[in-house]
């Protein structure tokens, strides 16, 4: 066979077919002899033949590729696998939709993060529910859009919304909190569009309620962590955007279920969940009987009884919490008085504690987060949430100073660890009091045995302060801030405290302890309070409906 004439056709049916096929196979490589020929004309002719065959093969491959793409575009949009079972084997054919073909043919220069969705997709099927288009939209809104819509002074939150990411990892562990998160995001998205609600918000609210009901009916034991978080998310969403009466019922149900679990001490094994629920109670629970007094009940006693006080104390939880608050303020006042420098030696001793003297001075990140600022919120409830978090931060930090001592090594170590967190360029703790409270509620020290007890005491104290009058609130907030700054002159303390009588009986006169007219004569009469457990003093409300 000559190279330029190409391979000849072989009749496989002839008797000599095997011999001819062997010759045919050898003849396919006859052009090699032509390329190695000493005759220039024969080499040129053979080279021309090989080049023509090469480009013919390329044109054939391109045409075949176009035909395959046309068939794939005509195939169903979903992945359809046609499988047949024969001889114990499964053979299948998977058709890809046009979008998959397009993605597969994209430039390979994309980074790994971009290929995985840039954090806005679920490539590893980590969601507890099927990832539909609405799910992807709401997850993206919760994790990326909401942190980017904060106040103009809070632009740093977009870089690393730590609290959002921690909560997202908590919610995606189970279907119930994940649906609650999507419900929250759907409500927020609807308000951005100027709507009270959308089909998305209604759908995920209904799905959350169905999942919670199924969980409560399925388990005879105390409810799971995911159910508690899901009910809390429903309460928060109703508190911010929905029906206030429904929010009250959700809060009441959450409180009863939490007591059945053993209250907050039962959540110490799940720090993120503990932080979320405590933060929600502090920031969003109502300050008066018009809402739901989250901490003015036996619930506050369950989470940390004072030494020497039994749960059967005939006094109300409010009175006992008032005792705690007045004792706390009086003790802090005496501690700060002892720290005031009276001579150069004491001033040098005070300056030796670097973090204690600089952590709360003007311009420091912690001081900035504890300062009053225009949050840009139009809703009074959202503005009050920031105020609640600021007061809770002041109480908690003063409790740290009271327990460890203002001028002690343990206090220096605590403040050093806290400042290292707030100084991180990617951390959002110093943005507002809401962000700082999240950090304070999260255990960031390896050995802090009194961390949770301190949190629960802060809850009881903020529950009393929430019921105080605006004038009392301002006096307490200013006093707690001065305690942290350690003034150089005793006159500053005198101006802050004034002639205030820090006694429980006097303090009760300055708080709004009167019940609302709707439940007058019922709320404060112990004999008529319908309780759900031996130590619970929940006020009569409508039954909790999920």
Image (spheres, rainbow, N blue to C red):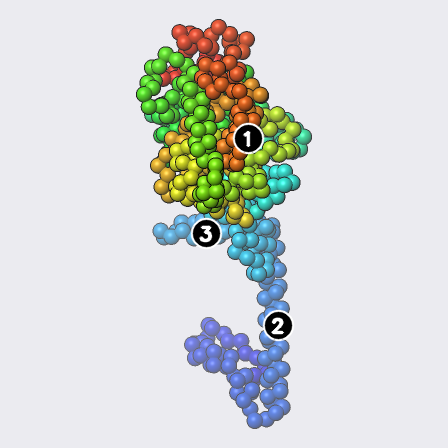
Q: Tell whether 303 sits left or right of 433.
A: left
Residue for badge 1: 492
Q: Which residue is located at x 54 percent, y 23 percent?
A: 498
Query: Is there CB contact under 8 Å for labels 3 and 2?
Result: no
Position of 72 relative to 286 (above/below):
below
Q: Position of residue 213 (x, y in %)?
A: 44, 24
Front residue of 235 and 72: 235
Q: Which mark is residue 56?
A: 2
Local crowd size for mark 2, using a 10 Å CA cut-off: few (<14), some (14–19), many (≥20) = few
Q: Which residue is located at x 47 percent, y 78 percent?
A: 25
Query: Is there CB contact under 8 Å for labels 1 and 3?
Result: no
- Secondary structure at badge 2 equals helix
Given the current orientation, which residue lies at the most extreme right position? 194
Q: Position of residue 118 (x, y in %)?
A: 55, 50
Residue for badge 3: 92
Q: Does residue 490 appear in the picture of this structure?
A: yes
Q: Earlier in the sequence, mark 3 or mark 2?
A: 2
């Amino acid at each position: 066979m000559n190279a330029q004439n190409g391979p000849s056709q072989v009749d496989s049916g002839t008797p000599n077919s095997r011999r001819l096929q062997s010759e045919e196979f050898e003849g396919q490589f006859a052009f090699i002899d032509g390329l190695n020929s000493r005759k220039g004309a024969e080499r040129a002719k053979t080279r021309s033949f090989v080049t023509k065959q090469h480009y013919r093969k390329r044109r054939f491959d391109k045409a075949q590729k176009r035909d395959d793409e046309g068939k794939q575009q005509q195939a169903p949009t979903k992945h359809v696998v046609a499988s047949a079972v024969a001889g114990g084997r499964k053979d299948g054919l998977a058709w890809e939709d046009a979008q998959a073909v397009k993605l597969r043919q994209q430039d390979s220069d994309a980074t790994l993060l971009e290929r995985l969705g840039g954090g806005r997709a679920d490539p590893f099927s980590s969601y507890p529910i099927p990832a539909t288009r609405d799910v992807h939209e709401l997850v993206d809104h919760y994790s990326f859009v909401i942190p980017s819509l904060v106040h103009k002074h809070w632009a740093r939150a977009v870089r690393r919304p730590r609290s959002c990411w921690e909560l997202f990892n908590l919610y995606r562990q189970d279907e119930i909190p994940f649906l609650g998160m999507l419900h929250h995001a759907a409500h927020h998205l609807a308000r951005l569009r100027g709507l009270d609600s959308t089909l998305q918000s209604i759908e995920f609210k209904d799905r959350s309620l169905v999942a919670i009901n199924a969980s409560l009916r399925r388990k005879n034991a105390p409810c799971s962590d995911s159910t508690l978080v899901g009910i809390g998310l429903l309460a928060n969403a109703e508190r911010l955007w929905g029906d206030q009466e429904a929010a009250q019922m959700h809060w009441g149900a959450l409180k009863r279920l939490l007591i059945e679990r053993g209250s907050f001490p039962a959540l110490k094994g799940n720090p993120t969940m503990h932080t979320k629920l405590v933060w929600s109670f502090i920031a969003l629970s109502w300050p008066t009987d018009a809402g739901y007094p989250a901490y003015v009940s036996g619930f506050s006693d369950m989470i940390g009884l004072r030494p020497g006080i039994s749960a059967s104390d005939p006094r109300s939880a409010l009175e006992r919490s008032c005792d705690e608050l007045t004792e706390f303020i009086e003790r802090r006042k005496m501690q700060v008085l002892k720290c005031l420098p009276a001579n150069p030696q004491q001033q040098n001793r005070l300056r030796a504690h670097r973090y204690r003297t600089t952590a709360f001075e003007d311009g420091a990140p912690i001081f900035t987060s504890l300062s009053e600022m225009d949050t840009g919120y139009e809703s009074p409830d959202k503005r009050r949430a920031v105020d609640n978090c600021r007061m809770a931060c002041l109480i908690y930090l003063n409790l740290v100073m009271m327990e460890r001592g203002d001028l002690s090594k343990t206090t220096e170590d605590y403040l050093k660890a806290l400042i290292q967190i707030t100084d991180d360029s990617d951390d959002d703790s110093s943005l507002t009091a809401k962000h700082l409270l999240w950090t304070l509620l999260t255990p960031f020290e390896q050995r802090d045995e009194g961390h949770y007890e301190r949190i629960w005491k802060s809850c009881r104290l903020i529950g009393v302060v929430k019921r105080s009058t605006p004038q009392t609130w301002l006096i307490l907030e200013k006093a707690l801030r001065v305690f942290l700054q350690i003034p150089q002159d005793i006159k500053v303390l005198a101006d802050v405290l004034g002639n205030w009588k820090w006694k429980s009986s006097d303090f009760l006169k300055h708080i709004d302890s009167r019940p609302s007219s709707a439940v007058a004569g019922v709320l404060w009469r112990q004999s008529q309070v319908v309780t759900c457990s031996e130590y619970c003093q929940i006020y009569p409300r409508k039954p909790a409906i999920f």
